[in-house]
Amino acid sequence: MKSKKISSKSKRDPLDKIGLMAAEVGLMGALGLVIYVGRNQPSYLLQAMFVLWVSAPFVALLVAHVRAKQWSSAARRTLCWLSLVVTVFSLALYGLVALHPPRTKTGLVFVMVPPLSWLLFAFAGIVSSLRTRRV
């Protein structure tokens, strides 16, 4: 009887693909919403800075997903859940700002969500590394 060799792709958790798709959807959604909210902004430089600022956490998630192939399954699972959480909460907050009537200081959400995402990344990384050391 011949034994079939299982490729590394078939062993991967389907959550990996969901996390990657979440990061991609988050990037596209965040970019669309920041461009929509800033459509009346006369400064193209300010618009470009907001686009870079808002997209940075999602680009970091996408880079992490590319590099995660060598990571432990627990670290990859953490990354996938992190992608889902950051995408859902970011798009929910950006969507609230974009779909409600214009107010002053709408940019505050677009300024504060990326650093909060980075803090969440750091916290998840620390917790994940501590959990893998104990095991």
Image (cartoon, rainbow, N blue to C red):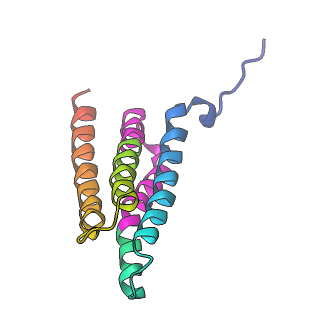
131 horizontally vs 85: left or right: left
Identify the residue shown where x is 27% and y is 46%.
125
Magenta stretch mostly in which secondary structure?
A: helix
Residue at far right of view: 1
The structure residue drawn at horizontal position 34% and vertical position 47%, both measured from the top left corner, is: 89
**What count of labels does the image hold?**
0
Along the viewing direction, whichever of 27 and 80 lies nearer the viewer:
27
Q: In x, y percent, where is residue 20?
A: 51, 47
Magenta region includes residue 76? yes
Which corner quadrant holds the N terminus?
Answer: top right
For this orientation, the residue located farthest to the front is 101
Using the image, determine if residue 45 lies above or below residue 117.
below
Residue 66 screen position, x and y as percent: 51, 53
Magenta stretch holds residue 60? yes
Can you say whether 27 is above or below 42 in the image?
above
Does 90 sit left or right of 8 as displayed?
A: left
Q: Is residue 49 above or below residue 105?
A: below
* Residue 28 relative to residue 84: left or right: right
* Residue 4, quarter of the rendered image: top right
Most foreground residue, 79 or 29:
29
Q: Which image quarter holds the C terminus?
A: top left
Q: Position of residue 45 (x, y in %)?
A: 39, 87
Q: Position of residue 37 (x, y in %)?
A: 40, 69
User: Residue at (36%, 74%) from the top-left corner?
Assistant: 50
Q: What stretch is highlighted in magenta?
A: 54-82
